Image (spheres, helix red, strand yellow):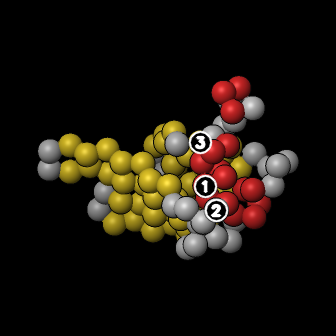
């Protein structure tokens, strides 16, 4: 999972194995810790909406997961705040 933060927006790029894991009902988590803090981003296939507290952001994809799993779809957007774009990033390593 690749995560990019910009002002008011989070962009998440997933490979095919990560999208398949969401389809199986598995959550995905990215985290970075440092002394005295850190942040965590969790994509959840069984919850909805965007919720954050402290350094943790949870993105619930349940309502949007069927769209994300469609072969023709490149991704989905959740309005937030912050706005979260979840995109497929299928590279040649998994094609």
Residue 95 rendering spot, x and y as whole percentages? 75, 32
Residue 91 rendering spot, x and y as whole percentages? 68, 29
Residue 74 rendering spot, x and y as whole percentages? 75, 45
Q: Which mark is drawn over residue 24?
A: 2
Q: Which mark is drawn over residue 70?
A: none
> How far apart, in angstroms, are the residues tagged by discs 1 and 3?
14 Å
Identify the residue shown where x is 61% and y is 58%: 22
Give the labeled residue for mark 3: 13
Identify the residue shown where x is 50% and y is 55%: 28
Q: Do the residues labelled 3 and 2 touch (CB within 8 Å)?
A: no
Of 39 and 18, the residue lying toward us = 18
Q: Considering the numbered disc 1 on the image, is that residue within a helix, a strand or a loop?
A: helix
Mark 2, Cα crowd under 10 Å, few <14 / some 14-19 / many 20+, is few
Identify the residue shown where x is 34% and y is 66%: 53
Judge whether 64 appears above or below 9 on screen: below
Name which of mark 1 and mark 3 comes first in the sequence.
3
User: Horizontally, is 19 left or right of 73 in the view?
Assistant: left
Give the labeled residue for mark 1: 21
Q: Do the residues labelled 1 and 2 touch (CB within 8 Å)?
A: yes
Q: Which residue lies furthest to the top in this view?
A: 92
Q: Which of the two discs, 1 and 3, sits closer to the camera?
A: 1
Q: Which of the two discs, 3 and 2, sits closer to the camera?
A: 2
> How far apart, in angstroms, are the residues tagged by discs 1 and 2?
5 Å
Figure label count: 3
Q: Considering the numbered disc 2 on the image, is that residue within a helix, a strand or a loop?
A: loop
Mark 1, Cα crowd under 10 Å, few <14 / some 14-19 / many 20+, is few
Name which of mark 3 and mark 2 comes first in the sequence.
3
Residue 37 rendering spot, x and y as whole percentages? 20, 51
Of 8 and 49, the residue lying toward us = 49
């Amino acid at each position: 999972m690749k995560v990019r933060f910009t002002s008011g927006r989070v962009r998440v790029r997933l490979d095919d194995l990560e999208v398949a894991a969401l389809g199986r009902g598995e959550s995905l988590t990215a985290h970075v810790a440092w002394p005295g803090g850190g942040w965590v981003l969790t994509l959840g296939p069984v919850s909805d909406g965007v919720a954050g507290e402290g350094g943790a952001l949870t993105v619930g994809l349940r309502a949007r997961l069927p769209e994300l799993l469609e072969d023709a779809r490149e991704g989905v957007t959740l309005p937030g705040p912050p706005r979260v774009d979840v995109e497929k990033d299928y590279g040649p390593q998994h094609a």
